[in-house]
């Protein structure tokens, strides 16, 4: 049970039940779809980028608790961050869910993202946690496209 | 499976016990997963193997390994005899009339591709139609799509009702003079529906249309008799029927197979080769290019021998009882909906829990030592038909028990507790 509680932490359950920034964005500068064909997770990410700063970030779609909470938390963490800061957080998040860094050692860097530390105990769920981040990465890198976990 | 009675006689209960007692023949089932006794309910994905299958394959590599056909030495003859004896076992298992109608392939998927690429390419042209159903596995959709794309033919789909049953009247209407082949699943992997294939075959034959049956999910649960069904092609995979992976069977009526061009070229499928002309081998070898999965074929034969010793009637009835018990207890949980409620069902139970994604269900059950499958089950169109992107699926074999159903029910309750 403890590994499960580590995975489904309160923050994750809360963001899954009431996802933040769960809306479309008509004036988005970039719109990217993220898709995990293995389990059917499917999100559309809306990004408003102004002078390299993420002014707004929202998403719609459906999927498992981990993927939805991850998209929700990502949005609330990244608003106001620069592109470079977002990329750095993406790298840290990726290392966290793969178990390459310990959440306890980087409390300031990770902030709310630390809630996803339990994912590393469930290797098949890493893709769920990273789907939104990979989608964002694509949105920051290029124009509108579709991201699949099977190419990530 | 179709004759379950509310009151069961004592004799049948005793025969059930004999069936359930076979569980100890499966060494893998004895292990613990995540500190819990393994509850393996992913049999529609692949079944576990009895010790005798494992031993047969090990003995082959320890004592018999040699390439078959053409060899003149002792081991090659021995391996050839064993492999051809395996073919004979399969013939008997399906009640085919001739060993030449039994083609070894890699699995159901390859069998369907073989028929699409040989029979299909020769007989299907522009404007023709291939008829499948809504509940097909991707392996009985994509090979036909590829063919239709190449030939300018049309893939048509028989609709199903909300229970997950084929609409026979619609099927009847869809059969027409442009229909060149019907290819349908015997038992749906996603819903568990047992389709009335014998009736459907007769209806197609009345119009002179051949029928291929995807039997991957049928053979583990029921006796299949290809002559009684009168199907033109029948495919199944060894690994779903307690044999090894990497081997499967295509049954085809001899007349049809004779007229079909080869599938792959190579060794073993030829009689003579010059740079000008190749003479193809006789059936079934014409379709068996290259060294086959010999150990796999022998393993399948051992699995068939094992099945032959089981009381199939008691097995079907026992599985039906498990399915009924699981359906009742699981559907009684608040927020759970069963997807696929056909009157005729094999022991496959797909369900969704309101507000909880199947992927999360799978993870939490795994922590409890329960193995189920979550996702679209390689049948995305049927998922769409039911308005879901994925389900959780528990699929049973004769070695599963009611106690395991109870563990599953408690597991689902825990899922709701954690995520509900």
Image (cartoon, coloured by chain):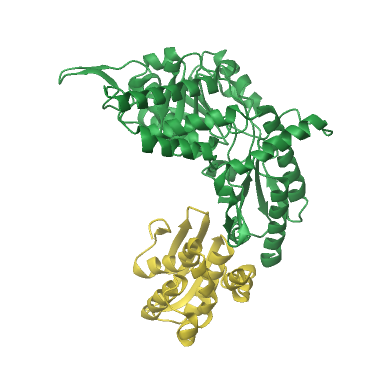
User: Which residue is at 55% across, 21% downward?
Assistant: B175
Relative depth, front residue between B370 and B53? B53
Q: Is residue B369 above or below residue B260?
A: below
x and y percentages locating residue A86 in the rendered image = 41, 77
Image hue for chain B: green
Left or right side of B94 for B330 = right
Q: Which residue is drawn at 55% across and 66% down?
A: A66
Rendered position, A104 above or below B89: below
Quadrant for residue B93, please give it. top right
Q: Can residue B162 be seen in this view?
A: no
Determine the image quadrant of residue A47. bottom left
Screen quadrant of the C terminus of chain A: bottom left
Q: Is residue B223 visible?
A: yes
Horizontal arrangement in the rendering, residue B19 relative to residue B124 (left or right): right
Seen from this angle, which residue lies furthest left?
Answer: B275
Q: Quadrant of residue A133?
A: bottom left
Name the residue nearer the viewer: A102 or B308. B308
Q: Nearer the viewer, residue B142 or A144?
A: B142
Percent x, y of residue A3 = 58, 70
Q: What is the drawing colour of chain A? A: yellow
Horizontal arrangement in the rendering, residue B411 relative to residue B30 (left or right):
right
Find the residue positioned furthest to the right.
B7
Number of numbered discs present? 0
Measured as percent of width and height from the top left, residue B326 is found at: 72, 46
- In percent of the image, x 46 and y 67: which residue is there? A130
The quarter in which the N terminus of chain A is drawn is: bottom right
The picture places residue A96, in percent across and down from the top left corner, at 45, 75
Q: Is residue A6 left or right of residue A151?
A: right
Vertical arrangement, residue B72 with respect to residue A34, above or below = above
């Amino acid at each position: 049970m403890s590994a499960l509680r580590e995975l489904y932490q309160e923050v994750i359950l809360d963001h899954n039940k009431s996802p933040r920034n769960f809306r479309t964005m008509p004036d988005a500068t970039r719109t990217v779809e993220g898709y995990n064909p293995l389990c059917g997770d499917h999100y559309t990410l809306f990004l408003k980028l102004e002078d390299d700063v993420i002014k707004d970030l929202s998403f719609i779609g459906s999927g498992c608790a981990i993927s939805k909470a991850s998209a929700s938390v990502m949005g609330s963490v990244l608003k106001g961050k620069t592109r470079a800061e977002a990329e750095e957080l993406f790298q840290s998040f990726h290392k966290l869910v793969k178990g390459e860094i310990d959440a306890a050692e980087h409390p300031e860097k990770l902030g709310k993202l630390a809630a996803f530390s339990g994912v590393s105990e469930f290797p098949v769920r890493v893709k769920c946690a990273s789907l939104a981040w990979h989608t964002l990465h694509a949105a920051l890198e290029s124009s509108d496209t579709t991201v699949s976990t099977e190419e990530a | 499976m179709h004759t379950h009675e509310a009151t069961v006689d004592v004799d049948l209960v005793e025969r059930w016990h004999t069936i359930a007692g076979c569980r100890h023949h499966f060494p893998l089932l004895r292990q613990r997963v995540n500190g819990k006794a393994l509850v393996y309910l992913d049999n529609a994905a692949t079944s576990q193997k009895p010790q005798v299958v494992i031993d047969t394959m090990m003995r082959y590599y320890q004592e018999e390994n040699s390439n078959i056909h053409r060899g003149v030495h002792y081991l090659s003859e021995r391996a050839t005899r064993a492999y051809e004896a395996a073919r004979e076992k399969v013939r008997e298992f399906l009640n085919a009339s001739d060993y030449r109608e039994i083609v070894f392939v890699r699995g159901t998927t390859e069998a369907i591709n073989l028929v699409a690429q040989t029979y299909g390419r020769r007989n299907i042209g522009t404007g023709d139609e291939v008829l499948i159903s809504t509940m097909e596995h991707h392996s009985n959709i994509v090979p036909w799509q590829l063919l239709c794309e190449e030939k300018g033919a049309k893939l048509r789909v028989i609709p199903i009702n909300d229970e997950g049953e084929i609409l026979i009247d619609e099927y009847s209407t869809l059969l027409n003079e442009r229909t060149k082949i019907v290819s349908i699943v015997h038992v749906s992997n996603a819903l568990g529906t047992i389709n009335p294939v014998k009736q459907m075959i007769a209806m197609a034959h009345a119009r002179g249309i051949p029928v291929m049956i995807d039997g991957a999910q049928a053979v583990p649960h029921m006796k299949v008799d290809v002559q009684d069904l009168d199907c033109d092609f029948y495919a199944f995979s060894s690994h779903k029927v307690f044999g090894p992976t990497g081997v499967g069977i295509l049954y085809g009526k001899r007349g049809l197979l004779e007229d079909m061009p080869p599938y792959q070229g190579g060794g073993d499928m030829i009689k003579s080769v010059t740079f000008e002309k190749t003479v193809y081998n006789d059936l079934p070898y014409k379709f068996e290019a290259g060294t086959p999965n010999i150990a796999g074929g022998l393993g399948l034969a051992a699995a068939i021998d094992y099945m032959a010793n089981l009381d199939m009637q008691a097995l079907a009835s026992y599985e039906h009882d498990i399915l009924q018990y699981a359906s009742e207890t699981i559907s009684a949980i608040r927020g759970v909906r069963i997807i696929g409620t056909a009157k005729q069902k094999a022991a496959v139970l797909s369900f969704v829990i309101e507000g909880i994604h199947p992927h999360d269900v799978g993870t939490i059950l795994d922590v409890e030592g329960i193995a189920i499958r979550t996702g679209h089950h390689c049948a995305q169109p049927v998922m769409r038909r039911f308005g879901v992107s994925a389900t959780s699926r528990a699929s049973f074999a004769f070695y599963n028990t009611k106690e395991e159903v109870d563990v599953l029910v408690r597991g689902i309750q825990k899922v709701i507790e954690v995520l509900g």
